[in-house]
Image: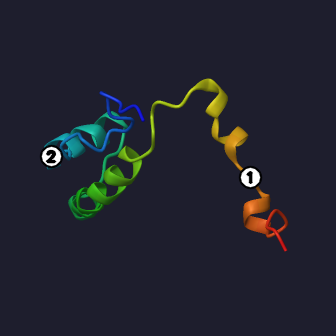
């Protein structure tokens, strides 16, 4: 089994600081009142952790639409 030297996702990166989150919101054109910005900053770490776990090193042939197997969810592809 080969191990990869490079991570396949971004989970190894440090979490964004509150100031970085404010800057990202500003760059996205969000002008939130202080209370909503506080809530946004509070919720950001969970969102950031989730999106950073998404694998980034898939080949073109591994495009998610090509790897989805509906029978796994419908019960039709299971042995009887």
Label of residue 5 in the image: none
Rendered-image quadrant of the C terminus: bottom right
Rendered-image quadrant of the N terminus: top left
Horizontal relation, residue 22 to residue 10: left or right: left
Question: Label 2's element?
Answer: loop
Name the colouring of the figure: rainbow
- Disc 2/disc 1 C-alpha distance (Å): 39 Å
Q: Position of residue 40 (x, y in %)?
A: 29, 58
Which residue lies at the image location 66% right of the left edge and 28% below the top edge?
61
Mark 2 or mark 1: name the one nearer the start of the chain.
Answer: 2
Q: Quadrant of residue 25?
A: top left
The residue wearing badge 1 is: 69
Which residue lies at the image location 14% right of the left edge and 43% below the top edge?
19
Q: Crowding at label 1, few (<14), some or many (≥20) Cα neighbours within 10 Å?
A: few
Q: Nearer the viewer, mark 2 or mark 1?
A: 1
Horizontal relation, residue 15 to residue 25: left or right: left
User: Relative to residue 80, is residue 21 depicted above or below?
Assistant: above
The residue wearing badge 2 is: 17
Q: Position of residue 72 (x, y in %)?
A: 73, 62
User: Relative to residue 47, is residue 59 depicted above or below?
Assistant: above
Q: Crowding at label 2, few (<14), some or many (≥20) Cα neighbours within 10 Å?
A: few
Viewer-side residue, 58 vs 35: 58
Question: Label 1's element?
Answer: loop
Q: Are marks 2 and 1 in contact (CB under 8 Å)?
A: no
Which residue lies at the image location 53% right of the left edge and 31% below the top edge?
58
In the image, farthest residue toward the front: 1
Horizontal relation, residue 22 to residue 50: left or right: left
Which residue lies at the image location 62% right of the left edge and 25% below the top edge?
60
Q: Position of residue 43 (x, y in %)?
A: 30, 61
Viewer-side residue, 9 vs 41: 9
Q: Position of residue 74 (x, y in %)?
A: 79, 67
Viewer-side residue, 26 vs 58: 58
């Amino acid at each position: 089994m080969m191990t990869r030297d490079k991570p396949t996702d971004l989970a190894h990166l440090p979490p964004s600081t509150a100031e970085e989150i404010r800057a990202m919101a500003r760059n996205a054109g969000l002008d939130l009142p202080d209370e909503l910005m506080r809530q946004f900053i509070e919720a950001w770490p969970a969102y950031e952790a989730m999106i950073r776990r998404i694998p980034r090193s898939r080949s073109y042939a591994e495009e998610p639409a090509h790897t989805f197997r509906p029978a796994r969810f419908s019960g039709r592809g299971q042995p009887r």
